[in-house]
Structures are given as C-alpha cells and as structure tokens.
Image (cartoon, helix red, strand yellow):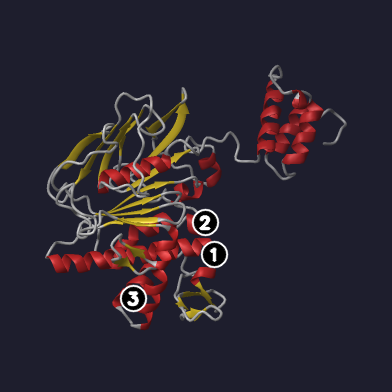
Amino acid sequence: MLQSLTLKGVGPAKQLGPVEFAPRMNFLTGDNGLGKSFLLDAAWWALTRTWSRGVPAAPQKAAKSSSIAFRYSKSTPGAYDESVTFDHLDGVWPLKQGRPPIPGVVIYAGVDGSFSAWDPARNYWKDKDASPSVKPRGFNFSPEQVWKGLQGPDGTWYCKGLIHDWVLWQKGKDPAFKDLVTVLDALSPSGIEKLTPGDPVRLGEDVTDHPSLRMPYGQDVALVHASAGMRRIAALAYLLVWTWREHERACERTRQNKAKEVIFLIDEIECHLHPQWQRRIVPALLRVMEALTGKKVPVQLIVATHSPLVLASVEPAFDIEKDAIFNIRLKDHQAVINAELWAPEGDVVNWLVSPAFGLQQARSVEAEQAIEAAEAWMRGDTDNLPQELNTRDKIHKALLKSVPGHDIFWPRWVVRTEPKGRKA
C-alpha cells in the first residue's frame, strides 16, 4: 500500500506533502486546479515507475531541484522508501537499476474514461533498459482502447477490448464472464437496479456483436448506447476482471504467487454517477475484490472527489485507524494539502459547508448572498453591505427571488425585521 508521497519543485506548489496515506480509504478534496489529479498521477508513478498518460511530470522552471519522494509497503516485511530527483540534463526522472519491490496490483481510473493497470506478474522489469517489447512497463488505455483493445508498439495485442472480450466470454461461457457478472453485481447501485448483461446485439448493418445491459424495463440496450454512468462502471468492471484474470494466468505461467494487495486510484469517483450510485460506489469497491476472488484481498482506495454524497456514504464504515481525508486549498498563492480531522457530518448539506468543500451556504450563489446580507442586517452590521443589498427592502426582494417560501430562514427574518402592520 502507498504510505507516503512528497512532491518538491513539481506540481502546484514548491512542496506538496508529505501526504501520509491511510491503508484503506483515502479521499482527496479541494477546488479545481489545485493538484488532486496531479497527486494521483504522481502516486501512480511512485507505485509503477510509469506515467499513465505517457508524459512525465515537468519540473517547475523556478525550482533549483525537483523531486518525488515516496514510501510503500511491499510483499516482504518493512517498507520501500525512495526519493527521485529530476535529471535536467537528460530530462528524465531516473530509475534505479534492478527490480523495485512489488506494491501489488494497481488500477488507475481517469476522469476522462482512460484506465491504467499495472501487474507485477506482467509489468515487472529487471533493469531500466528492459525493452518494452519484451515486457510492457504498464497498460495504459485511452478511452477508445478500453473498448476496442490495446496493442503494443510491435503489434502485440495486450488486450482485445471490452466489446470483443465481453461477447467472446459470454458466447463461450468462459469463467471470465461469470467473474464479470459477479463484479457488475458488486458494483451495482442497489438491490433493485442491477447491472445485468443482456444478450449480444447488432447495430444496423454492422455484423459486430455488441455487449448489452438488460434494463429495469426489460429491454436489452447496447452498452455503447447506455448512460455515461453505466458505461463507466461497466468499463471499470471489465478492466478489473481483465487485469485480475491475466494476472492469475501470468502467475500460473511464471510460477509466481498472486498479488496480496490491490490499489485503486480513481479521479472524480462520482463522475457521471446518479446520486443513488454515488453513495454506494466506495463501499462497493471495498467489497469487489472479495466478490471476484472469493477471498479477503486488502484494498487501498485513493480517490479524488467533489461529491458530498461520496463522503456521507462512508460515514458508517470510516475508521480513523484505516482511513483518511485530505483537503487541498490555496494559501499565499501555493497549493497546500492537509489531513483533516474526521468528523461525521450526517448529511449532504453539512458536508457542503464542511472544510472539505467550504461553502458558506448550501444554496445558490444568489441565495447565499441574500441570506448573508440579511444576517448582517439583523446584526446591525450594515457598513460593508453592497449597494444592491444595503436596505431592508432590497434584501427582502432578493430573498423573495432566491429563497423558497418554506425555507426555515423566513420566520427569523420576518420576526426580526417586519414592520408592524405590514405583511411579508
């Protein structure tokens, strides 16, 4: 499991971290553009020595030295601790000779539909000069390659893709299809709305058989025509089955032991998901490996999220010994990351105004401004009110426009400010 990560002279700050990750659930929160995705990219590199998009992180121009330091647990006792300094002469993040320790199977789901997988049985190299054609350093799928397959530079097919494999497994009654059904069931949003494969379908004159999902209304819909949320979950299920299936085959072929741990890195875990799914996806990911293997496989999640529902969903399971939440905020024009004290908020509204998201009001901007002005008016603090909200009548009109009549704020406002004999 990834235990620590520190970035210096690279990314959104002179120094970001050290980030001390928990062994099970880790949540990265913060505004857009402050480095959550970059931190996931760096975590992927620390664990796999590859860059998921094929482009190394660029050092800051003003930095005299740029480094990435990290620590992770390994299959043998102890932890692997290393710091890598960017080599400006060669323009690379240099790797040490020899084989690094194994962190486990690592899967990275990008917000754009891309996926990356690293398998110690297939992507482990002996030295830094190992040819990619002999052993690929990792499997990096563009969104299109997830569906249509991934080839190496020498033409080798590493993966035939979701469309081909799903139908092949289904028609051939391959055990992999049973695994896929199991994983789809584990990742489904509820006991009522299950992701269940339908029969293969064809689209127009194209003779290609496409996988389908059986919808709650009984119709089989081609997966390519399903909702974005369904497609993302289906792609995650497929990549998980493909990764673990090929890992088992490689271990059997090379007489290696199977990985003891799985690490999921997921950017914007709630992307495309209905709220019903947002509050179930994290617990589902914690269970999915046990559903797939029938065994208790330790899972570490490191996820970036903008969803208060995701955080509310884990309150019953959150353990401060196993889990952590981090917030990245801007301070003196630098991104700063802090581990937040865990405090259950109870509902989405409370999460929205918590340090994780930092809203003043869980409302529209206009309603927030009107209520803030009303609060100031009731306190007698009127010196700094904007001109458009500097009288009782202006504030009242703004409240009428932006705050519904049943809102709990109205009684206090009316009682405190309504002139005698006048109705609000």
**Most distant residue in the right direction:** 421
In the displayed structure, does residue 347 sit left or right of residue 60? right
Residue behind mark 1: 227
Instruction: Decide: few, some or many residues near mark 2? Use Cα within 10 Å; few <14, some 14-19, many ≥20.
Output: some
Secondary structure beneath disc 1? loop
Position of the C terminus, as image quadrant, is top right
Asked if 83 appears above or below 347 in the picture, the reply is above
Q: Residue 43 placed where, x, y %?
A: 31, 43
185 or 171, which lies in front? 171
Cβ atoms at labels 1 and 2 below 8 Å apart: yes
Label ID, residue 272: 2
Q: Residue at x 30, y 67 (%)?
A: 157
Instruction: Decide: few, some or many residues near mark 3? Use Cα within 10 Å; few <14, some 14-19, many ≥20.
Output: some
- The amino acid marked with disc number 2 is His
Residue behind mark 3: 178
Secondary structure beneath disc 3? helix
